[in-house]
Image (tube, rainbow, N blue to C red):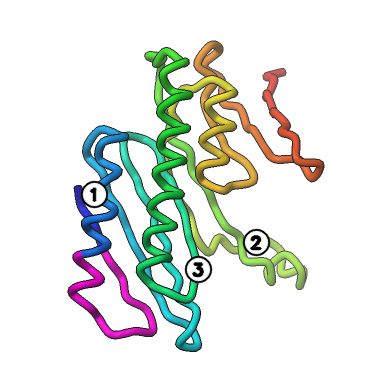
Amino acid sequence: MQIAVTFRHMETSEPVRAYIEEKVSRVKKYIDEPIDAQVAISVEKKIRHRAEVTIVAKGITIKGSEETNDMYAAIDNVVDKIERQLKRYKEKIKMHKPHAGKERQVQKSVLAAESIDEGQGEPVIIRTDSFPVKPMEVEEAVMQMDLLHKDFLVFTDARTEEVNVVYRRKDGNYGLIIPQAR
C-alpha cells in the first residue's frame, strides 16, 4: 500500500505522518492490493483542521474529507468514513457477479468557457483526461458514482456492452442515458 501525505499550511510532522499511515493502512482488509492512498491535511486560521483522503484500488476510487478543531480527530473521522464506504461497497459487490466484458477507454475534454462566450469561433480544449470504463450493472454504476461524489458516470453496461451514462437528477433520483444508434 502506497500512502502519500501532503501537509498544507502547516509544518511537516512525522508523528502525524505515522498516525495517518497507521490509520489508513486499516483499509487493506476491505480491498485487494494494490492500493494507492493520497492524504492531504491542512490547517486554516489555526482552528480548522481538515483531512482529505482519496483511495484508488482495483478499479474504484473513494474520497472522503472531514473538518474539526483537532487534527487527530479529523484523521480518525475521515478514515472511519472511508471504512464505512468500503464496507458498503464490499457488501454490494458480493451481490453482483463480475462480468467479463470489454473495457473501453473514454476521453474527457474540458473547454475554455471564454472561447465560447466571446464568440471566438471554435472552443479551446484546455484539458483532456482519458480513463478506462469497466463493464458494470446500472446499480453498481450508481454506487460508484456515489462513492466518487460525482453528478454523472459513464460506464459500459455489462449485459449489452454499450456505453451508458447514469446521472443524479435535481430531485435526488437518478437518470440513465442509453444511446441508440440510428
Q: CA distance from mark 1 to mark 2?
A: 44 Å
- Image position of 79 with respect to 87: above or below: below
User: Which residue corresponds to the image point at 71% horizontal and 69% vertical from the top-left?
Assistant: 120
Q: CA distance from mark 3 to mark 1?
A: 21 Å
The nearer-to-camera label among 1 and 2 is 1
* Residue type at tag 3: Glu
Res 25 label: 1
The nearer-to-camera label among 2 and 3 is 3
Expressed as whole percent of the image width and height from the top left, the position of residue 148 reads 51, 45
* SS at mark 1 in the image: helix
Mark 2: few/some/many CA within 10 Å (<14, 14-19, 20+): some
Indicate left or right for 1 with 139 as reference. left
Magenta stretch holds residue 8: yes
Taking the view exactly as shown, the residue that stands out farthest to the right is 171
Indicate left or right for 38 with 162 as reference. left
Expressed as whole percent of the image width and height from the top left, the position of residue 31 reads 30, 34
* Residue type at tag 1: Ser
Res 123 label: 2
User: Which residue corresponds to the image point at 55% horizontal and 60% vertical from the top-left?
Assistant: 125
User: Which residue corresponds to the image point at 55% horizontal and 33% vertical from the top-left?
Assistant: 143
Seen from the viewer's position, the closer of residues 8 and 102 is: 8
User: Which residue corresponds to the image point at 46% horizontal and 15% vertical from the top-left?
Assistant: 96
* SS at mark 3 in the image: strand
Res 67 label: 3
Expressed as whole percent of the image width and height from the top left, the position of residue 121 reads 71, 64
Mark 3: few/some/many CA within 10 Å (<14, 14-19, 20+): many
Q: Are marks 1 and 2 in contact (CB under 8 Å)?
A: no
Residue bounds of the magenta highlight: 5-18
